[in-house]
Image (tube, rainbow, N blue to C red):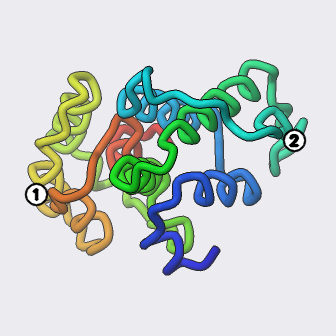
Amino acid sequence: MTEQDWLTSDDPYRMFQWLRATEAIDRTRLGALFAAFCALIPPEAASEPPLGTGDWPVENEGGIALTDAVRHLAAATFEAMWSAGRDPNRRATLASVIRDIFGNLFRPVAFDPAWRTATAVAVARQMYETREFGGMPILADALQDAGCEDEYILHHCRDTTIPHVRGCWVCDLVLDRL
């Protein structure tokens, strides 16, 4: 997958498989992805996933053993994603959610801890706890006031066309969860 593919894909299955192959999935992000997908996919839309969802490596890149619980969570996330079926709107939304949680893995962001001001943390924590992300533009202002000039971070916060979920990569950076 190229960076352009990642930024424009509306195929959550392909994105998830790529994340799995690059071992970019950790327990925290996998949990966020699963929770977001379950909230977005109505139970009546569930379908059987393809075979092979439980075929996860025993260790990740860092040599950390993946427990049965993590493998089961991965399989459940995959099943929730697969349930998007052929509905193009649902698939596009899930692809956007994946990008909200993982960001652009082709261009890692250098987050300055000085941007983690009391205001920025309070805004991010409020959104995290309430699962209401309408304050993302306010978070952008707080980060900018703290000296952040990273256009990718600021654009992500100010773009009201993308869904934001608990596990958003910017909120996680502000809350020091990554």
| Quarter assignment of residue 127 | top left
Which one is in front in this view, the residue at disc 1 or the one at disc 2? Answer: 2
Q: Position of residue 100 (x, y in %)?
A: 38, 52
Residue 123 visible within the image: yes
Element under label 1? Answer: helix
Whether 91 is drawn above or below 34: the answer is: below
Residue 57's disc is 2
What quarter of the picture does the N terminus occupy?
A: bottom right
At label 1, counting other C-alpha atoms closer than 10 Å, the crowd grade (few under 14, some 14-19, many 20 or more) is some
Number of numbered discs: 2
Element under label 2? Answer: loop
**Point 81% across, 44% down: residue:** 60
Q: Nearer the viewer, residue 103 or 20?
A: 20
Q: Position of residue 14 (x, y in %)?
A: 62, 59
**Point 51% across, 44% down: residue:** 85
On the rendered structure, is 81 left or right of 174? right
Q: Nearer the viewer, residue 12 or 29?
A: 12
Q: Position of residue 104 (x, y in %)?
A: 47, 66
Write down the residue under mark 1: 141
| Quarter assignment of residue 158 | bottom left
Kindly report the distance in space between the C-alpha atoms of the residues bearing marks 1 and 2.
Answer: 41 Å
**Point 52% across, 31% down: residue:** 34
Residue 169 visible within the image: no
On the rendered structure, is 45 left or right of 159? right
Contact, mark 1 vs mark 2 (Cβ under 8 Å): no
Whether 97 is drawn above or below 104: the answer is: above
Amino acid carrying label 2: it is: Pro
Q: Position of residue 162 (x, y in %)?
A: 25, 56
